Structure formats: structure tokens, C-alpha cells
Image: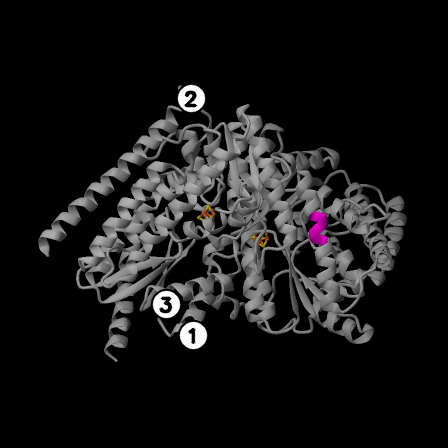
């Protein structure tokens, strides 16, 4: 048993290295784009990237960059720079960090490669549009807005017409910017890979259904980078196949991510990038495993429609009907399904000062989950990148009190 | 001013007024939260549009639904709903504007038992043909949805009549703004605020008459009175202003607000609607062409150009930006607009407003310092 564990742990470390290498290679490629006569597009995390790949445009994600800035604890410095430029400290810290980073080429990788175009899909929030407007002025490059109307209750025929028209406009925009024709067959192929990547990612996340869970949400936050930045590439598929198999083996061998898994928890909202290790240790210490989260699973849902024959219609619906673009009650329904599916004992909610669309509605979500499933929740006040308001001692105390409550409930 | 007292009463007792109006006229009352709501469609349904703008009461219910980092406008609107103070409403309309209003709509729908609930998911960008088509589509849908909720058929004729009404209202308010811009002594800033605020509350037919009479009255007054050229002419910009106390502070410091770029001010009455066939398309046309709100996209520098144009046109010496705390769309725009102002040599003061606003003494000093500089 311990032999297997050793072997699987080794493979896990190797895979993590691989991920880091893929990401490093990806950023090097992106930075060399100019030399290689390739165009660079900046795109939002939930945006339609497949057409960019089909056009050989390198897609760069300022939000992923924001996450790296947060994880390397460079967020405060950059956020303060943005504030000195006049940006309010209440704005999304991904945006603040990115806007400041462009003026100083700072951050963990010395800034992102300059964009030739910007592609902004507002299916996650309205902040991205304002942020991309700032960047369009700064870099003086064209901005394409893929406007996905909010589906509070449904995706209406009016929306469908509008978004489908925009998919066609998006193709025209790219054709104009690259001087090439959109290759629909290639796009379909990439779309297929995207769907497969999302499926593999879902299968990976689903390995946490077993007890003990072979991975935690913190692992998922780490491994997410590829499905965000390189979905639709064969490399990504291969990576997630390996990851899924590894997690399956771990679960078959009964190897848990957390020693003596006692409590299974669900995470809501973005990760707190600057306290990943700290939080992961804190929960593990108490035998609490964060088995699932609403954030990384968002990249599974988006793709549910993408494999239909009609690329335009399926992309439009897939991208519009995405998690943060739904009504709070719809989001709650999904959370309730996850509570059952992953058999969780409680929910940890990151009330994220940076992100209003994700955070407003959490109090209602909390009440719904308590009412429908009778499980308790913990609310942690933080910000995903900017750690100025984060109090370790306060959060630690609250986590301990929460675990104590779980313990008593389990005992009862 | 003859009608000022009536406007004041309406503003001070807005909900009492609306309740009474409902009782007396039998009209359905439809609340809404943003100046992109097409009032014309509500009027054409025979209902009364009432804009809800935060609250003056203490917040104690909304806090269990919204975190501390939410703007006071959204928090205040929710408080009015949860407290039942607006339970006379027959329905509420939520146009999509910012992320906070997006979630407000959900929270309202999930928690407020009275009245129907309608989302109006307008396009966020306005600069493409497909967005313009969608604008028309979604207004048609709104017409159908609202008609169903109110059980009336909203006819083209009724829409055209409503358009005539709102056009007349907008023309009158603009005329008042213009008269006052020429001679700010004609009317205090607070009174102007009261008048504009009242026009979002009051029965529109009555309002129309009162405004027309006010314009006539001010014209006579303008002819008689000499302009005061000593005043430091200021433009206010930002999201909304629900703080009439700001005006006397600026005035006492020797300034005069001669125009604004608020959605509770000039943005509300700019652009008329073409009167003619296909009224819905014409309403859509106005929503696309009116001065843009930063929660929407039409171009990259239109707002900066608009404010600079206002400064020139109105012969103003500086701009005071009132930004509501936690308002993302405005906060994102501000630094680049400020840069454009600097380049154009226009002095700018920024005031971040939270509810309640900073103590009077503190604000007074800041206004004085700014006006001194001009
Ligand atoms: S964190 Fe929230 S506000 Fe910021 S870009 Fe992401 S979805 Fe938008
Ligand atoms: S636009 Fe700004 S002030 Fe208006 S509701 Fe949204 S956040 Fe609040």
C-alpha cells in the first residue's frame, strides 16, 4: 500500500512539474509571438477562444495572469500602483493588477506580451468590459466585445439571434485582423477537442466523489490553468487524460488527498490565490477535504453545447449559458446538485470583495443550502489577489469554529 | 417658482404620493431602477413609472442579502423592497446595467413577494447593427411581457402618445437647464434637483403641465434678471446624485452648477424620440443615441469627449466628479477621463460618495479649496 502511495505521489509531483513546464512554454511562445509573426489576442477567461486557435492567434488570459500575480504575492504592490493611477481600491483586483502591470511590465513573468487585439466576453461580469476598454485605449488595438445577455431565468430566442449574429461578427473581426479566412473544419476540430478537454476535466473532478477523495479543490485550482488557457489543444487532452487516470488510481488504491479525511467540503467563489498553501494546510490539519468547488467546474458547463454540428448556434448558447451569467437561484440549484453528488458536509464561501457577480447572492445561496440540505456554511471575507484586508488569525479562528461545529454535528 | 412646493412635496413623500396616485387614478404603479428603462412602454400600458433610487432610511434588512462592498444605491433599493415600504408596487423592472443591479434583480425576485418582476436584458454594447436589432427585439419582448403582466394590450397608438408626453417632458427640463445655465441665479441647484427628481415620481401628465408652466415662468424671470458673471461655473459628473445637500455647499463656496452628466440629471432628458411609425424602434433609437452610461459600450472615449464638450459649451471652469463608492463602471472610467481633462486643461475634483456623505465641514473645505483654484 505505501509503495503504491509513494509511486503515485511521485507521479503527481511529476505531473505538476509538467503543468508548470507547459505553462512556461506557453508564456514563452506568447512572448515570442512577434518574432514568429504570430498575433496575440487577450481574451477573458470565459470567452470563445476556439476561433482564435483556428486562426493561429495566440490567446493570452489576463485573468490567469492575475491569478499568477496573486499566487506569487505580487498583488498588493501592483494594486497599489493601479490606485496611484486613479483606480479605486474597490475594483476587481485582477483588473487592477493587470492595468498596473502593463505600465511597469512587472509581475512574476515580467508582464504579458502586448496584444494585437482584445476579445472580451461579458459572460462572467461587466468589469471585464470596462477593463478591456482601458486596455484598448492603452494599447490602441481593436476590441471585440462578445456580448452575452444575462440569463436570469432563460436563454430567449432574442438572445439567441443576437449572440449568433455576434459569433459571425467575431469570425469577420478575426478574418479582418489576421487577413485569413476562417477554416470552419479546423474550428470544428478544435471545438471537439475543447469539449473533450472539458469532459476529461469533469471526469478528473469527479474522482473526488470517492472516499477518501484523491484530490482537493486546491489541486483543482492548480490544474485548472490548462483548461482555461490551452483548452482545445491536443497537449491539454493528453495532460488531463494522465491527470484523470492518476486520480482514478489514487482513488482505487484508497489514497486520500487529506490524511484521515473526516469532513468533505465544497468551496464557492474564486480561490484566494495568495493563501492557497496556508488554507490548504489549515483545512487538512483538521481532516477537512475540499472535495469540490463552483469555480473550476464552471469550465465544464460552458462546453456542454459545443459539440453540436452547428458551430455558431452551439458556441452562442454554450458561452451565454454559463455559470456566472445565470440567476442566483439557478446557481443555487447547481450548488445543491454538487452537494449531493460529492456528498459534502458543509460549504466554505469566499466572500470576494473583488467580484460582485460571484459574491452578491452568496448570502441567499447560503440560506438555500442550509434550508434544502441542512448543512452549515462558513463565510470567509477576502480578496483573490489583494491580501491587504486578509487577517490570518481571524480566518483561522473562524475555520476552527466551523470545524468544531461540523464535529459536533457528526457526533450527533 | 409657483410649482416648487408641489415638486418638493412629491419628492419628500414619494411613496405616499405614489400610493395616493394609485388610489385616486386606479393606475398600476411600476417601479424601475435605471434610466435605460423605457418609461414610454410603461406609460403606454396605462401604468405609472416610478424610479426607485436608494433609501433615506437606515439599512437593516438588505445587509443580510448584500455584503458590505455593495453600492448604496443597490442596497437602498433592496431595503425599500424588503421593508415593504414599496409594497404598493404592481411590479418592478430591472434593466441590465451593472453587475450589482444584475444580482439585485435576482435577490429581489427570490425574496420580494409582491408585484411582478421583469428583467429587461438590454445589449451592453450599442455600436453594432446586431446590438441595435437586439435592442429593438428586447424592447418588443418587454412590451409583450409588460402587457401580459398588466393584462393590457400595448398599442402603437398608446406608445406614440407616450412618446409625445416624454418628449415634451424632456424638452421642458432641457429648457430649464438651459435657462439656468445662462443664469444660475434663476434657481438654486437644490430646486433643480427637486424638479428633476420629481419628474421620475410624479404623474407624467400633471408633470408635463407643471414643467411647461415653469419654463414660461423662468423665461419671464430670465428676461428681468441680470446675469451674475461672478459665479464660478461648474459641471457635475458621475453616476447619480441623490444628495441635494451638495448644491448649497458648492453655491456657498461661490460656485454654480451649470450642467451635469448624471443619469438622474442631464442623461435622463437628453435625446428626444422621433415621433412616427414603429414606435418601439424609435424608442430603441433613443436608447442607443442618448449620452451613454459607463455600464454600456459605444466607443472608447465618448464620455470624455462629451464632458469636455459640455465644459466648452456651458463655459464652465471645472468639473466635479461625484463617484458612488463601489460603483465599478464609473470607477473604471475615471482615470482615463481625468487624463483627458488634464490634457484639455480642465481642472477636476473627485469626490467619492458613500452613504452618508462626509461631514458638511469637511466637504465645504474641499469645495472651497477647489473653487479657489479656478
Ligand atoms: S474576478 Fe469577478 S469581477 Fe474580476 S474579472 Fe473575474 S468575474 Fe469579473
Ligand atoms: S452603476 Fe454603479 S451606482 Fe449604479 S447600481 Fe451599478 S454599481 Fe451602483
Q: Which is in the foreground here, disc 2 or disc 3? A: 3
Identify the mark nearer the N-term, 3 or 1: 3
Residue sitting nearer the eye, B201 or A140:
A140
In the visual, does B211 lie left or right of A239?
right
User: Residue under circle 2?
Assistant: A34
**Residue B345 at x, y percent in the picture:** 62, 29
**Residue B200 at x, y percent in the picture:** 73, 59
Q: Chain of mark 1?
A: A
For the question of whether residue B307 can be seen, the reply is yes
Label 3 Cα neighbours within 10 Å, binned few <14 / some 14-19 / many ≥20: few
User: Residue under circle 3?
Assistant: A340
Q: Chain of mark 3?
A: A
Say if labels 1 and 2 share a chain: yes
User: Residue under circle 1?
Assistant: A371
- Quadrant of the rendered structure where residue B235 is? top right
**Distance from mark 3 CB to nearest ligand 1 atom below 8 Å:** no
Q: Which residues are magenta?
A: B135-139
Amino acid at each position: 500500500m505505501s509503495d503504491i502511495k509513494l509511486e503515485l505521489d511521485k507521479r503527481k509531483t511529476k505531473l505538476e512539474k509538467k503543468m508548470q513546464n507547459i505553462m512556461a512554454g506557453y508564456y514563452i511562445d506568447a512572448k515570442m509571438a512577434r518574432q514568429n509573426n504570430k498575433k496575440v489576442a487577450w481574451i477573458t477567461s470565459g470567452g470563445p477562444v476556439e476561433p482564435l486557435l483556428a486562426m493561429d492567434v495566440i490567446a493570452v488570459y489576463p485573468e490567469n495572469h492575475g491569478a499568477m500575480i496573486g499566487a506569487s504575492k505580487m498583488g498588493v504592490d501592483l494594486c497599489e500602483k493601479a490606485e496611484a493611477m486613479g483606480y479605486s481600491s474597490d475594483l476587481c483586483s485582477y483588473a487592477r493588477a493587470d492595468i498596473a502591470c502593463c505600465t511597469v511590465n512587472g509581475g512574476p513573468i515580467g508582464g504579458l506580451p502586448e496584444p494585437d487585439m482584445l476579445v472580451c466576453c461579458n459572460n462572467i461580469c461587466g468589469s471585464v468590459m470596462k477593463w478591456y476598454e482601458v486596455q484598448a485605449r492603452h494599447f490602441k488595438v481593436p476590441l471585440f466585445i462578445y456580448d452575452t445577455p444575462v440569463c436570469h431565468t432563460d436563454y430567449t430566442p432574442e438572445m439567441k439571434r443576437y449572440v449568433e449574429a455576434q459569433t459571425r461578427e467575431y469570425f469577420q473581426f478575426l478574418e479582418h485582423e489576421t487577413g485569413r479566412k476562417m477554416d470552419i473544419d479546423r474550428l470544428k476540430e478544435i471545438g471537439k477537442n475543447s469539449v473533450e478537454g472539458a469532459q476529461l476535466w469533469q471526469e478528473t473532478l469527479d474522482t473526488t466523489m470517492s472516499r477518501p477523495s484523491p484530490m482537493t479543490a486546491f489541486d483543482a485550482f492548480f490544474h485548472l490553468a490548462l483548461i482555461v488557457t490551452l483548452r482545445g489543444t491536443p497537449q491539454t487532452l493528453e495532460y488531463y487524460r494522465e491527470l484523470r487516470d492518476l486520480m482514478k488510481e489514487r482513488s482505487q488504491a484508497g489514497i486520500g488527498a487529506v490524511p484521515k479525511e473526516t469532513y468533505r467540503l465544497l468551496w464557492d467563489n474564486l480561490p484566494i490565490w495568495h493563501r492557497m498553501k496556508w488554507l490548504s494546510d489549515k483545512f487538512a490539519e483538521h481532516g477537512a477535504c475540499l472535495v469540490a468547488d463552483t469555480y473550476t467546474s464552471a469550465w465544464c458547463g460552458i462546453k456542454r453545447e459545443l459539440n453540436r454540428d452547428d458551430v455558431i448556434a452551439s458556441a452562442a448558447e454554450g458561452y451565454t449559458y454559463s455559470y456566472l451569467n445565470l440567476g442566483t437561484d439557478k446557481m443555487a440549484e447547481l450548488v445543491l446538485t454538487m452537494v449531493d453528488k460529492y456528498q459534502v458536509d458543509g460549504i466554505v464561501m469566499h466572500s470576494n470583495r473583488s467580484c460582485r457577480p460571484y459574491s452578491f447572492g452568496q448570502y441567499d445561496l447560503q440560506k438555500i443550502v442550509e434550508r434544502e440540505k441542512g448543512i452549515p456554511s462558513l463565510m470567509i471575507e477576502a480578496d483573490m489577489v489583494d491580501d491587504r484586508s486578509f487577517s490570518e488569525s481571524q480566518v483561522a479562528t473562524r475555520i476552527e469554529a466551523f470545524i468544531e461545529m461540523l464535529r459536533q454535528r457528526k457526533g450527533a | 417658482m409657483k410649482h416648487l412646493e408641489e415638486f418638493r412635496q412629491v419628492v419628500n413623500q414619494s411613496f405616499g404620493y405614489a400610493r395616493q396616485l394609485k388610489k385616486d387614478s386606479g393606475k398600476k404603479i411600476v417601479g424601475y431602477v435605471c434610466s435605460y428603462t423605457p418609461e414610454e412602454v410603461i406609460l403606454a400600458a396605462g401604468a405609472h413609472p416610478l424610479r426607485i433610487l436608494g433609501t433615506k432610511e437606515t439599512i437593516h434588512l438588505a445587509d443580510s442579502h448584500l455584503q458590505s462592498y455593495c453600492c448604496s444605491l443597490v442596497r437602498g433599493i433592496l431595503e425599500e423592497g424588503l421593508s415593504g415600504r414599496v409594497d404598493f408596487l404592481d411590479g418592478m423592472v430591472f434593466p441590465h446595467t451593472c453587475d450589482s443591479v444584475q444580482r439585485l434583480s435576482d435577490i429581489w425576485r427570490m425574496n420580494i413577494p409582491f408585484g411582478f418582476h421583469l428583467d429587461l436584458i438590454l445589449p451592453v454594447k450599442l455600436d453594432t447593427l446586431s446590438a441595435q436589432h437586439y435592442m429593438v427585439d428586447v424592447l418588443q419582448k418587454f412590451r409583450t411581457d409588460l402587457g401580459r403582466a398588466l393584462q393590457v394590450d400595448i398599442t402603437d397608438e398608446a406608445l406614440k402618445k407616450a412618446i409625445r408626453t416624454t418628449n415634451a417632458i424632456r424638452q421642458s427640463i432641457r429648457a430649464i437647464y438651459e435657462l439656468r445655465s445662462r443664469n444660475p441665479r434663476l434657481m438654486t441647484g437644490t430646486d433643480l434637483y427637486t424638479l428633476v427628481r420629481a419628474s421620475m415620481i410624479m404623474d407624467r401628465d400633471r408633470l408635463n403641465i407643471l414643467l411647461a408652466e415653469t419654463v414660461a415662468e423662468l423665461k419671464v424671470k430670465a428676461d428681468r434678471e441680470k446675469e451674475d458673471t461672478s459665479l464660478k461655473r461648474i459641471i457635475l459628473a458621475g453616476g447619480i446624485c441623490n444628495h441635494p445637500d451638495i448644491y448649497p455647499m458648492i453655491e456657498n463656496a461661490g460656485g454654480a452648477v451649470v450642467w451635469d452628466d448624471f443619469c438622474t440629471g442631464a442623461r435622463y432628458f437628453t435625446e428626444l424620440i422621433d415621433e412616427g411609425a414603429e414606435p418601439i424602434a424609435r424608442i430603441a433609437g433613443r436608447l442607443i443615441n442618448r449620452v451613454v452610461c459607463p455600464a454600456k459600450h459605444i466607443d472608447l472615449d465618448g464620455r470624455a469627449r462629451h464632458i469636455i464638450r459640455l465644459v466648452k459649451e456651458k463655459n464652465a471652469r471645472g468639473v466635479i466628479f461625484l463617484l458612488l463608492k463601489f460603483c465599478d463602471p464609473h470607477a473604471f472610467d475615471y482615470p482615463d477621463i481625468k487624463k483627458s481633462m488634464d490634457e484639455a486643461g480642465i481642472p477636476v475634483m473627485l469626490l467619492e460618495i458613500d452613504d452618508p456623505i462626509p461631514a458638511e465641514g469637511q466637504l465645504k473645505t474641499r469645495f472651497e479649496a477647489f473653487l479657489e483654484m479656478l
